[in-house]
Structure formats: C-alpha cells, structure tokens
C-alpha cells in the first residue's frame, strides 16, 4: 500500500515535466530568440532602409557615413571610424531626422564657402 503512494507523486512529477515545463521552456526560448532577432537584425534593417529611402527621396547622394563624417569635420571634431559607425547606428535607430539636419548644415557651409 505504501508503494502506491510513493509512485503517484513521481508519476505526477514526470507528467508535469513532460506536459508543462518542457513546452514552456521551448516557447520561452523561441520567444527570446525572436525578440533578439528583431531587436538586433530586423529593426536595424528597417531603420536603415527608411533612412536610405528618405535620403533618396530628397535626392541626397551621400551615404549616412559620409554625412556624419563631413558634418563633424565642419564642426572641427575628428572622429574615428568606429565612433562614426556607432553614431550612424544611433541616429539611424533613434534620430533619423538628424541626417537631414546634418546634410542641410553641410550644404549651407559648402554654399557659403563657394560664394567667397
């Protein structure tokens, strides 16, 4: 009689693992992978495409990298390639309108230097 009572909890635990914990773990892992894929790959791709489309719409032939580099040269700041790439990603994902503002500054500075 005692053996039956010991077997019931062990069977319940085995069933609980098979039917509840394993599927929850698989779903949780799939959710985390999907979130990381979106956060680090898909979101950056969509932001990059959006900024490039905006630059094309305004007939701007410079790349995001060139705009940031020239803007900082005009400001008198020397930046490494790594810093420019980091800023490019930040602006692309969080402040895409900054590319147009920087381009306007570059264009205004080149127009005033051509007049002199």
Image (spheres, rainbow, N blue to C red):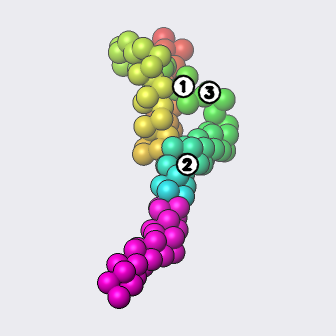
Magenta segment main secondary structure: helix
Residue furthest to the front: 1
Residue nearest the observer in this picture, 112 or 9: 9
At 47% from the left edge and 44% from the top edge, which residue is drawn? 93
| SS under mark 1 | helix
Q: Which label lies toward us, 1 or 2?
A: 2
The relative height of residue 67 versus residue 73 in the rendered view (above or below) is below
| SS under mark 3 | loop
Which mark is drawn over residue 37? 2
Q: Does residue 44 appear anywhere in the picture?
A: yes
Which mark is drawn over residue 65? 1
User: Mark 1 and mark 2: span between their CA atoms?
Assistant: 24 Å
- Residue 84: image quadrant is top left
Residue furthest to the bottom: 1
- Say whether residue 88 is left or right of residue 1: right
Q: Does the magenta stretch include residue 22?
A: yes
> Do labels 3 and 1 touch, CB within 8 Å?
no
- Residue 16: image quadrant is bottom left
Q: Which of marks 3 and 2 is nearer the N terminus?
A: 2
Which mark is drawn over residue 3? none
Q: Does the magenta stretch include residue 4?
A: yes
Residue nearest the observer in this picture, 93 or 66: 93
Q: Which of marks 1 and 2 is nearer the N terminus?
A: 2
Which mark is drawn over residue 62? 3
Check the picture and name the quadrant holding the N terminus.
bottom left
Residue 77 in picture, x, y percent from top left: 35, 15
């Amino acid at each position: 009689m005692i053996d039956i009572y010991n077997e019931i909890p062990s069977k319940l635990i085995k069933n609980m693992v098979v039917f509840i914990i394993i599927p929850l773990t698989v779903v949780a892992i799939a959710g985390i992978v999907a979130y990381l894929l979106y956060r680090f790959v898909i979101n950056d791709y969509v932001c990059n495409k959006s900024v490039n489309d905006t630059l094309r719409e305004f007939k701007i032939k410079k790349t995001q990298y060139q705009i940031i580099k020239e803007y900082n040269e005009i400001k008198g700041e020397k930046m490494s390639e790594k810093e420019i790439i980091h800023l490019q990603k930040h602006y692309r994902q969080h402040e895409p309108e900054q590319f147009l503002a920087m381009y306007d500054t570059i264009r205004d500075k080149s127009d005033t230097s051509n007049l002199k």
